């Protein structure tokens, strides 16, 4: 809007004009650095991280295969339809061919079908074990953390007792703890899931408690307390949600370790005694005997485990990085 | 310093006591009770009764626990069902083998992981960094027993570069002094024995080292990266100090503190990790014995070994804390 | 003296942080000033205005990757003048600590926690003055004594966490002056300290400057520090100098609204009772690009349409040579005296906010 010096624009109009212009200039810079939730923020950062993308692709692929495995697998994983063609004693195995894409295993079962169905079992083991560790660990750690932050003397005692128990569990190396549990309950797939899950409890508990203690020292908790907000409410609505980051990260990482540990327990003979229904750990344990004669039998489940674990680990690590306040900026 | 150690030692007592309760309850809860574990399945009822009495199983729970505890303090951890020898003795005869294996693994992990992690951090984003990070992720994600099998098949069976089983070639004559084969060999100057033992340690040591190596590499890298961004490193540079001085005295000295802790914790966990590796290489240590005990349901062995390993783990943690306090003056002051 | 060139002449210094792919962000944009021996020059501004980046650029301590440094910083070295920004890293390492030294903001994090204080002092003596063993230890003790640390021989054996905040800053100053540098940069040296300690540290710095004839570049957001210490003051905003003047004219007749705002936001004992403090509203993030207009405009109560028409130039005041400002609508001296005039636009500003 042109203004001639002879007829000055009214003052209020000039003011509006300059305010508009300023808003326009500021608006062009305001796109960066808009405030948003830490999770949305983390997600945005992960979208550009190749590590996170690789991990996500692997995980999505794995979960999809696991979920739809009955539709994908061409044959029954337990059918020994080609049993007459394989003679492990004579080192006669059948490799990949049109009918059986990955060949046959030592009992003449279709390796491809077993691999696909195995993904489902493996996912189940990983998820259930992680859930066991997460639920009990978060419960214990959350209770200890809440008591320590808000409970005064009585709370400190509860915290102390819980943490001594957790310390005790930590004194047992994970695998040994799992072996102990498995030896107690007897070998089965449930044993493996339970054993691996229980072994993860102390890690979850310590993480959550530590995060809650760190949050408890923040000013906003003090402020809420001074305003008379009830204790359990502070713990539930303020401290807990703000402390979940490390626990969520750990869950993702635990999915990987659970799958690996489960394979180790299967190898130790504590897994499903009925090896006919496939799970990658069991398949791998079974195939060790033929590693020098028919390596393919072991390589497929091993690659399955390694790649899946890698996927979860990549995802978890990049999530940890994305949530790290030190790296955020 | 002494007070610090004593206080930490006292803190161990509740942990170990709690552990003994846990194991005691565990024994009680075994299917059919502990006598089932000690007897064949088809044992006659009289024999069963006699055993219950001799084990004091008819006594009240607390009395049983305290006698259990008393026996532990006397070093009596029970007797192996399969070998018939005391559990403690079995442990002590197998301990040197596992110890040598664990030391080998940690040595490999530290010798490779520290420089690798450090160089990866210095050349952040470069090819070496990429390889180190990728390699360590792969190391963490590979099941140890599979790696052990792979090493055994490729390097021992196919290529024949290394022996595939045992601590030492059975044909070799050696003088046994301490039970530590390598140490004995050095003491008696039987260099062929030392060499043979080291060859036997190489593959299982490498397999067992995979996870510690991966962890140490990643930790060193992360720690060095963090320290390089610290204010005091900037101060050191502002003082114009030589690059090497800055890197050693100011970066490494601080960056290695968390790594020391990690190394300690990892060495503790190796005794359990050895279960897998030792069974693959038929390495006659604690791990392979636990493996056998698991399969044979040798409960006294399992309980005793778990208690001993846990005690060792806790002790190693104590050593780590002490060494940490020696390295970090801030901890010492508290 | 007199005819000599200044000890350090910084011309058109600019520092850009390049993001991968995105356009580089200019943290410092064409800043010029000069430092004279025995004088204290202040670099004032809020956090994020580029003052710390300026000091790190002069010291050559910015990371190699992703940073672009432009301009010149010519320093009179014993072997003749040289451009610090163009020197190779190896030469800069020789100069740092011996010719130019720096004191940092947070004394605790700036000291290595696991190395005794003594070692941290002697290492610089060893590096630049070739002193070793007992001689170095004795000199270190002397240095600590000189910066006012009692019982220096005992302190040499102690670790940073065993010292008080003021003592740590003194130790850092001891390291900075260890090799009698001709130029010292102090980056907010008192911010992390108690008020009582602050005054002591400033006094110590003042004494060192007068005794040694060192040139001191004082970086701070605190105009109180500036008033007591600096001979010459540069006010920075969003990476550019907005006002430059010797101490007296700057405090008596500040012309840039930002400087006026900074002055208005410090509490004064001589102000009439009940008079409110006038903080500068908004934050450094509420700005516009210098290329579009005055970056301070969004927070300014005096901005006009002219402020939004391209970059404002740096101009010298007619009445007062040596007093330079970057403002197209500067505050006249009369207005400052009459605070009522100063306050009225703020009311307008509040109306606009609604």
Image (spheres, coloured by chain):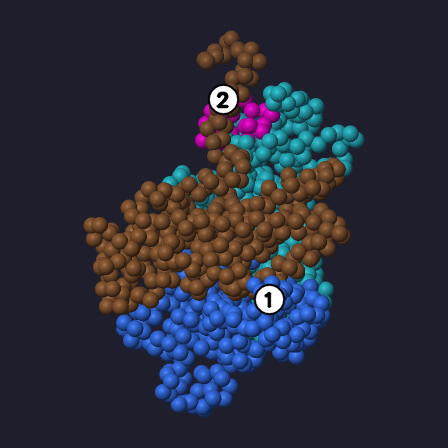
Look at the picture and state if B301 lies above or below A116: below
Q: Name the residue under label 2.
A: A21
In this picture, residue A71 sits left or right of residue A123? left
Give the quadrant of residue B44. bottom right
In this picture, residue A140 sits left or right of residue A85? right
**Which disc number belongs to residue C271?**
none
Colour of chain A in the rendered structure image: brown
Residue A174 x, y percent position in the rendering: 52, 62
Q: Main secondary structure of the magenta part?
A: loop
Residue A108 x, y percent position in the rendering: 27, 57
Chain letter, colour cyan: C
Q: Mark 1 points at which residue?
A: B33
Query: Which numbered mark, 2 or 1, is in the foreground of this view?
Result: 1
Residue C290 magenta: yes
- Binning the other alpha carbons within 10 Å of mark 2 as few (below 14), some (14 to 19) or many (20 upward) gives some
- Binning the other alpha carbons within 10 Å of mark 1 as few (below 14), some (14 to 19) or many (20 upward) gives some
Residue B56 x, y percent position in the rendering: 67, 73
Look at the picture and state if B98 lies above or below A299: below
Give the residues drawn in magenta, as a range.
Answer: C289-313
Residue A167 magenta: no
Q: Residue at x 47, y 61 (%)?
A: A187
For this rendering, which residue is in front, C237 or A209? A209
Residue A46 x, y percent position in the rendering: 44, 43
Chain letter, colour blue: B
Q: Residue at x 38, y 58 (%)?
A: A275
């Amino acid at each position: 809007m042109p203004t001639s010096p002879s007829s000055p624009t009214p003052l209020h109009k000039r003011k509006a004009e300059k305010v508009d212009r300023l808003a326009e200039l500021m608006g062009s810079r305001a796109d960066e650095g808009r405030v948003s939730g830490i999770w949305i923020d983390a997600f945005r950062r992960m979208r550009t991280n190749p590590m996170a993308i690789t991990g996500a692709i692997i995980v999505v692929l794995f979960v999809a295969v696991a979920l739809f495995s009955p539709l994908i697998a061409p044959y029954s994983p337990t059918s020994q339809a080609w049993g007459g063609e394989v003679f492990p004693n004579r080192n006669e195995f059948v490799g990949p061919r049109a009918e059986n894409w990955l060949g046959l295993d030592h009992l003449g079962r279709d390796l491809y079908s077993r691999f696909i169905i195995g993904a489902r079992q493996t996912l189940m083991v990983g998820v259930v074990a992680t859930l066991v560790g997460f639920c009990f660990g978060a419960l214990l750690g959350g209770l200890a953390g809440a008591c320590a932050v808000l409970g005064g003397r009585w709370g400190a005692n509860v915290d102390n007792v819980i943490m001594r128990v957790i310390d005790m569990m930590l004194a047992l190396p994970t695998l040994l703890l799992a072996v102990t549990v498995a030896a107690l309950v007897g070998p089965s797939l449930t044993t493996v899931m339970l054993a691996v899950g229980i072994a993860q409890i102390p890690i979850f508990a310590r993480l959550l408690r530590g995060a809650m203690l760190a949050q408890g020292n923040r000013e906003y908790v003090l402020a809420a307390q001074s305003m008379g907000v009830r204790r359990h409410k502070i713990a539930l609505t303020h401290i807990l949600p703000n402390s979940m980051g490390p626990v969520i990260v750990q869950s993702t990482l635990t999915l990987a370790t659970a799958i690996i540990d489960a394979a180790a327990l299967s190898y130790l003979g504590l897994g499903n005694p009925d090896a006919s229904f496939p799970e990658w750990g069991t398949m791998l344990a079974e195939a060790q005997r033929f590693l020098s004669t028919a390596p393919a039998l072991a390589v497929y489940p091993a690659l399955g485990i390694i790649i899946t674990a890698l996927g979860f680990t990549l995802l978890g690590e990049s999530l940890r990085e994305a949530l790290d306040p030190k790296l955020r900026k | 310093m002494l007070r610090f150690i004593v206080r930490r030692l006292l803190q161990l007592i509740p942990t170990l006591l709690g552990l003994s309760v846990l194991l005691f309850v565990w024994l009680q809860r075994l299917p059919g009770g502990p006598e089932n574990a000690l007897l064949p399945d088809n044992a006659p009822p009289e024999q069963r009764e006699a055993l219950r009495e001799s084990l004091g199983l008819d006594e009240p729970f607390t009395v049983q626990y305290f006698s259990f505890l008393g026996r532990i303090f006397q070093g009596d951890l029970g007797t192996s069902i399969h070998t018939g020898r005391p559990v403690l003795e079995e442990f002590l005869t197998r301990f040197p083998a596992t110890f040598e294996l664990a030391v080998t693994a940690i040595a490999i992990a530290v010798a490779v992981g520290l420089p690798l992690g450090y160089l990866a951090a210095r050349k952040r984003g470069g090819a070496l960094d990429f390889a180190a990070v990728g390699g360590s992720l792969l190391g963490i994600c590979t099941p140890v027993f599979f790696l052990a099998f792979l090493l055994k098949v490729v390097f021992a069976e196919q290529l024949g570069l290394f022996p595939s089983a045992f601590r030492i070639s059975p044909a070799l004559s050696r003088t046994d002094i301490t039970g530590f084969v390598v140490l004995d060999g050095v003491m008696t100057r039987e260099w062929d024995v030392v060499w043979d033992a080291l060859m036997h340690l190489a593959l299982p040591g490498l397999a067992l080292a995979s996870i510690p190596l991966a962890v140490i590499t990643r930790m060193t890298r992360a720690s060095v990266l963090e320290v390089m961004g610290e204010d005091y490193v900037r101060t050191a540079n502002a003082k114009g100090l030589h690059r090497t001085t800055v890197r050693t005295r100011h970066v490494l000295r601080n960056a290695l503190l968390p790594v020391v802790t990690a190394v300690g914790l990892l060495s503790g966990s190796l005794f359990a990790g050895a279960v897998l590796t030792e069974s693959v290489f038929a390495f006659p240590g604690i791990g392979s014995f636990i493996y056998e005990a698991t399969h044979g349901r040798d409960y006294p062995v399992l309980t005793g070994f778990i208690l001993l390993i846990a005690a060792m783990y806790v002790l190693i943690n104590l050593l780590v804390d002490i060494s940490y306090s020696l390295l970090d003056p801030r901890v010492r002051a508290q | 003296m007199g005819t000599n060139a200044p000890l350090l002449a910084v011309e058109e210094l600019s520092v850009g942080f390049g993001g991968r792919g995105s356009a580089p962000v200019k943290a410092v944009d064409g800043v010029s000033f000069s430092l004279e021996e025995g004088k204290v020059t202040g670099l004032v501004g809020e956090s994020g205005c580029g003052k710390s980046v300026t000091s790190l650029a002069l010291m050559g301590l910015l990371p190699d990757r992703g940073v672009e440094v432009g301009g010149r910083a010519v320093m009179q070295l014993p072997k003749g003048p040289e451009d610090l920004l163009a020197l190779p890293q190896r030469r800069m390492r020789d100069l740092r600590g011996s010719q130019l030294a720096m004191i940092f903001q947070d004394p605790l994090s700036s000291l290595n926690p696991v190395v005794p204080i003594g070692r941290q002092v002697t290492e610089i003596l060893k590096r630049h003055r070739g002193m070793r063993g007992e001689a170095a230890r004795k000199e270190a003790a002397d240095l600590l004594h000189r910066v006012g640390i009692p019982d220096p021989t005992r302190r040499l054996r102690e670790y940073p966490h065993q010292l008080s905040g003021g003592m740590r800053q003194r130790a850092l100053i001891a390291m900075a002056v260890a090799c009698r540098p001709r130029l010292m940069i102090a980056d907010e040296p008192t911010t992390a300290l108690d008020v009582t300690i602050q005054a002591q540290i400033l006094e110590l710095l003042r004494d060192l400057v007068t005794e040694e004839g060192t040139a001191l570049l004082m970086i701070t957001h605190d105009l109180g520090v500036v008033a007591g210490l600096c001979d010459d003051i540069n006010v920075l905003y969003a990476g550019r100098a907005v006002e430059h003047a010797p101490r007296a004219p700057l405090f008596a007749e500040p012309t840039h609204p930002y400087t006026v705002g900074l002055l208005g936001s410090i509490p004064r004992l001589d102000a009439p009772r009940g008079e409110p403090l006038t903080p500068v509203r908004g934050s450094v993030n509420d700005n516009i690009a210098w290329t579009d207009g005055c970056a301070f405009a969004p927070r300014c109560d005096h901005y006009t349409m002219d402020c939004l028409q391209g970059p404002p130039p740096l101009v010298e005041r007619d009445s007062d040579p040596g007093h330079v400002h970057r403002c197209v609508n500067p505050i006249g001296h009369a207005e400052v005296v009459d605070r009522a005039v100063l306050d009225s636009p703020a009311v307008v500003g509040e109306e606009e906010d609604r």
